[in-house]
């Protein structure tokens, strides 16, 4: 089985950390290809960043499909381009926010999300609503650490997590950034609560779907994009 884990920003260091976490839960015989786009933002911290990350993400999905990937993980907590990726890909595509939030509902009555910047909290609330788990979400909180600095601020993130648990009284914590993936086990041990990382959750979910022979339904909304020309810099994205 071959699964592509796509970090939609262009940071190779962050991509390497994400790949290590995904490989840590890969089944024997599962190959994890951790990749990032050749074009797009260095980090995704705004709606603008998210929108401009999608073309590079879709280009990686398409090249992975040609290379034989059977499933894909979108490793950004905003789940950018998820619907478009499901149209484009043959195999299942799972975003890390969707996977983490759904896993968290199986581990307690409520969960809280700890994310990077305050300006991204609204997006997390929107996704909780979309995925039908808003009633489980006790809060979304920012540690005010930029995405590319997350790996170097474990103490600040841990302090934020402690404060969130006291404030919300939640049973589970969800890490709201793919760059936090390496902190998951340590935080869970220190805080004494389940801490859910979306990278591992999504990787395991995609593996399960592939093993069950399940793919995205292609008879309706997620059918392949209709063929048409694209103009300008997006010329190469035209179908047919």
Image (cartoon, rainbow, N blue to C red):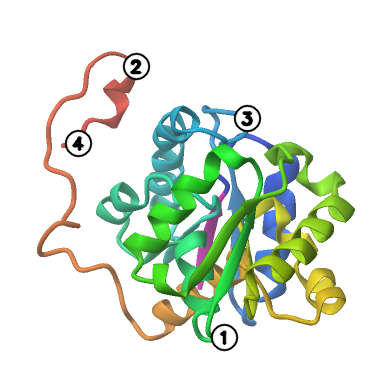
Q: Is residue 169 magenta?
A: no
Q: Nearer the viewer, residue 190 or 2?
A: 190
* Residue at (71, 70) in percent of width and height: 165
* Residue at (87, 74) in percent of width and height: 190
Residue ID for mark 1: 108
Q: Do the numbered discs 1 and 3 sit on residues whose CB atoms are within 8 Å?
A: no
Q: Is residue 155 left or right of residue 35?
A: right
Disc 1 element:
loop
Residue ID for mark 4: 239
How far across and how far down the image is residue 52, in percent? 43, 28
Which mark is nearer the camera, 3 or 2? Answer: 3
Residue 233, labelled with which disc? 2
Q: Do the numbered discs 4 and 3 sit on residues whose CB atoms are within 8 Å?
A: no
Q: CA distance from mark 4 to mark 3?
A: 27 Å
Precedes in sequence: disc 1 or disc 3: 3
Precedes in sequence: disc 4 or disc 2: 2
Does the rendering let one see residue 177?
A: no
Q: Quadrant of residue 219?
A: bottom left
Residue ID for mark 3: 42
Q: Mainly helix, strand or loop, the magenta region?
A: strand
Does the rendering let one see residue 157?
A: yes
Precedes in sequence: disc 1 or disc 4: 1
Classify 10 Å Cα crowding around label 3: few (below 14), some (14-19), many (20 and above): some
Q: CA distance from mark 1 to mark 4?
A: 44 Å
How far across and how far down the image is residue 125, in percent? 44, 55
* Residue at (27, 21) in percent of width and height: 235
Classify 10 Å Cα crowding around label 4: few (below 14), some (14-19), many (20 and above): few
């Amino acid at each position: 089985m071959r699964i592509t884990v796509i970090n939609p920003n262009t940071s190779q260091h962050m991509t390497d950390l994400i790949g290590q976490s995904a490989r840590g839960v890969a089944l024997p015989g599962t190959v994890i290809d951790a990749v990032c786009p050749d074009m797009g933002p260095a980090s995704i911290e705004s709606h603008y960043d998210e929108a401009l990350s999608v073309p590079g993400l879709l280009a990686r999905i398409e090249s992975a499909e040609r290379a034989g990937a059977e499933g894909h993980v979108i490793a950004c907590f905003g789940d950018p381009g998820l619907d478009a990726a499901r149209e484009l890909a043959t195999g299942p595509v799972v975003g890390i926010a969707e996977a983490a939030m759904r896993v968290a509902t199986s581990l307690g009555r409520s969960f809280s999300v700890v994310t990077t910047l305050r300006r991204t909290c609204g997006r997390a609330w929107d996704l909780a609503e979309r995925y039908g788990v808003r009633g489980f979400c006790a809060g979304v909180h920012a540690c005010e650490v930029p995405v590319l600095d997350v790996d170097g601020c474990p103490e600040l993130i841990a302090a934020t997590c402690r404060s969130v648990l006291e404030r919300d009284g939640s049973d589970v914590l969800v890490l709201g950034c793919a760059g936090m993936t390496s902190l998951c086990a340590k935080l869970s041990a220190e805080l004494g609560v389940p801490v859910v990382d979306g990278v591992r959750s999504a990787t395991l979910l995609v593996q399960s779907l592939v093993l069950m022979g399940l793919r995205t339904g292609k008879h309706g909304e997620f059918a392949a994009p209709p063929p048409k020309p694209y103009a300008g810099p997006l010329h190469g994205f035209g179908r047919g």
